[in-house]
Image (cartoon, rainbow, N blue to C red):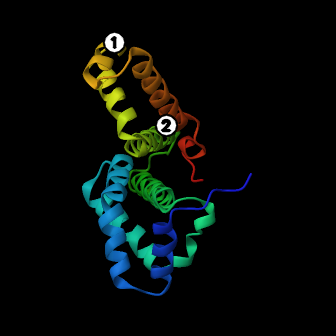
Amino acid sequence: MATPAPPRWDRAMQQRLARGEEAALGELYDRFGPLVYGLALRILDDEDAADRVTREVFGHIWENPDAYDPRDGNMRSWIATLTQRQSVSRLRAFEAERVRSGGQRAGEPFEARVREANTAARADFIRDSMPASIRAALNLAYIQRRDYRQAALELGLSEVEARRRMRLGLQMLATAMQHPGANGGAR
């Protein structure tokens, strides 16, 4: 099965970056900076470290614009993957330093923390990427504690449609648990 063509914006941005257009990097940062910082913060739970990862990710993109291949998927997912890998790498480096300085052994609790952080970051990415109509139904059900009947009323939908949107949103979020990156390793 062929991979669908990526959006024109992604292809054009990759080409602009490859030509060394500084304005392209600024535009890319404006569009994806909050995503990168948010994912890094979710994994690292440290604002300074998330800032560093954000700079490192965009630095890597600037220095290696051909690393993105539009045939492999959209730029947003590629940037999220870079962020996840860099964040997990930094988290492991922090843990290794802590173990060296304290004489403690790294172990399963740390790896469980890495898996949990990866899964949470992936779930956040999926939630933020889903269509607003599905996100709204999930928000009503799981944040505001509405049942599907109440959500249908508030959204102006049939009960069947409200249930469908909630189910679809949950199925999308379930992929965070099944994603290869969720096991603590990079894809």
Label 2: which secondary element = helix
Residue 163 at x, y = what percent?
43, 19
Among the two numbered marks 2 and 1 on one chain, the one whose residue lies closer to the N terminus: 2
Quadrant position of residue 68: bottom right
Q: Is residue 155 above or below residue 181?
A: above
Which of 153 and 96 lies nearest the eye of the viewer?
A: 153
Residue 186 at x, y = what percent?
57, 53
Q: Which residue is mark 2?
A: 112
Which of 105 and 154 lies nearest the eye of the viewer?
A: 154
Q: Amino acid at mark 1?
A: Arg
Q: Amino acid at mark 2?
A: Ala
Q: Which residue is mark 1?
A: 149
Please report the residue visible at 49 percent of the width from the left and 62 percent of the height from the top.
75
Number of marks in the rendered image? 2
Q: Is residue 144 left or right of residue 158?
A: left
Residue 115 at x, y = what percent?
50, 40
Which of 70 and 44 lies nearest the eye of the viewer?
A: 70
